[in-house]
Amino acid sequence: MAQRKKLIVGNWKMNMNVHQASVFIHHLSKKVAVHRDVEVVVSPTMLALQPLSLQIDRRQFKLAAQNFYFRDHGAFTGEVSATQLSGLVDYALVGHSERRHVFHEHDKLIRDKVQAAVRNRIKPILCVGETAHERSEGETTGVLHDQIVGGLANITSEELSSIVIAYEPVWAIGTGKNAMPDDVKKAVHTIRNQVKHLFGEAAAQAIRVLYGGSVKPDSAASYLAIPGIDGLLVGGASINVHEFELIIASAHHRADSPEAWAL
Ligand code: PEP
């Protein structure tokens, strides 16, 4: 049975300034124990990455960039590259639904970003998921297929080991709507099948798959119990110290349970 480290990622989006981010992590650090089998990652505003990188104990927290540009350097006013983030962050979100839908990021750009992250030794968290309309039209499987094939098009089998996939149904993000565990289970199965088709059985067993979409302390455990789910991508609840602490505690609890590693 594959042993995949649990991963809890807090996406702070465009919330908190540098000072507030520092105070937040100070409070959170008092509440979160270091756990060998659970990684906790926070993704603050780009401005806070540098100061937080000096403040955190990397055994307790890792950092993720919310965004970056796919070119390594050059005349791209206002952009930040994966090369510039290299060494500062361990992870980066790619293809988050807000980037896809608010900023119209398309599959080619997302593919280029996945490649740029890997090239710069940053682990991409590739976010995939269907909209409410696509779901009502029965297109979920097709959407996941296209987003995975598109996002991983230029990746080799060796590079795949650094990639995380987050299943985030768009209609569940920031809405308070909860995806049913059975639907999440089906989606995770589709994702692993697609990875198996592209990269083989061992890769499908090894890749970490997260769930994201309005996760709160009272729903975290039920998502973490879904076979094949290795962690959570948390938005709203990750900017509340108490809520995020409880979600992390659910992952600790899960990692300690005997069925924690079932596919
Ligand atoms: C997200 O930002 O990826 C997310 C899942 O947000 P929320 O938890 O607020 O739905």
Image (tube, rainbow, N blue to C red):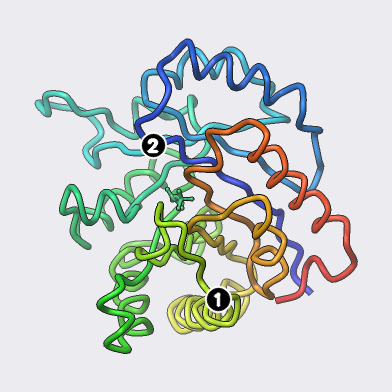
Report x, y in % for residue 15: 39, 28
Report x, y in % for residue 128: 38, 65
95 on left or right of 177: left
The quarter of the picture where residue 231 lies is bottom right
Queried on whether the Cβ of the residue with tag 2 lies below 8 angstroms from ligand 1, the answer reads yes
With respect to residue 207, does 23 lie above or below? Answer: above
Report x, y in % for residue 196: 51, 81
46 on left or right of 29: left
The quarter of the picture where residue 71 lies is top left
**Cα gap from disc 1 to disc 2, whole angstroms:** 25 Å
Q: Secondary structure at mark 1?
A: loop
Disc 2 residue type? Lys
Report x, y in % for residue 92: 43, 42
Queried on whether the Cβ of the residue with tag 1 lies below 8 angstroms from ligand 1, the answer reads no
With respect to residue 114, does 20 lie above or below? Answer: above
| Mark 1 burial class by Cα count in 10 Å: few <14, some 14-19, many 20+ | few
Q: Secondary structure at mark 2?
A: loop
The quarter of the picture where residue 225 lies is bottom right
Q: Earlier in the sequence, mark 1 or mark 2?
A: 2
Q: Disc 1 or disc 2, which is closer to the eye?
A: 1
Quarter of the rendering occupied by the C terminus: bottom right
**Residue sitting at 53 percent across and 51 percent down?**
233
Disc 1 residue type? Met
| Mark 2 burial class by Cα count in 10 Å: few <14, some 14-19, many 20+ | some
Quarter of the rendering occupied by the N terminus: bottom right
Between 232 and 111, the residue placed more toward the observer is: 232
Q: Which mark is residue 13?
A: 2
Q: Which residue is mark 1?
A: 180
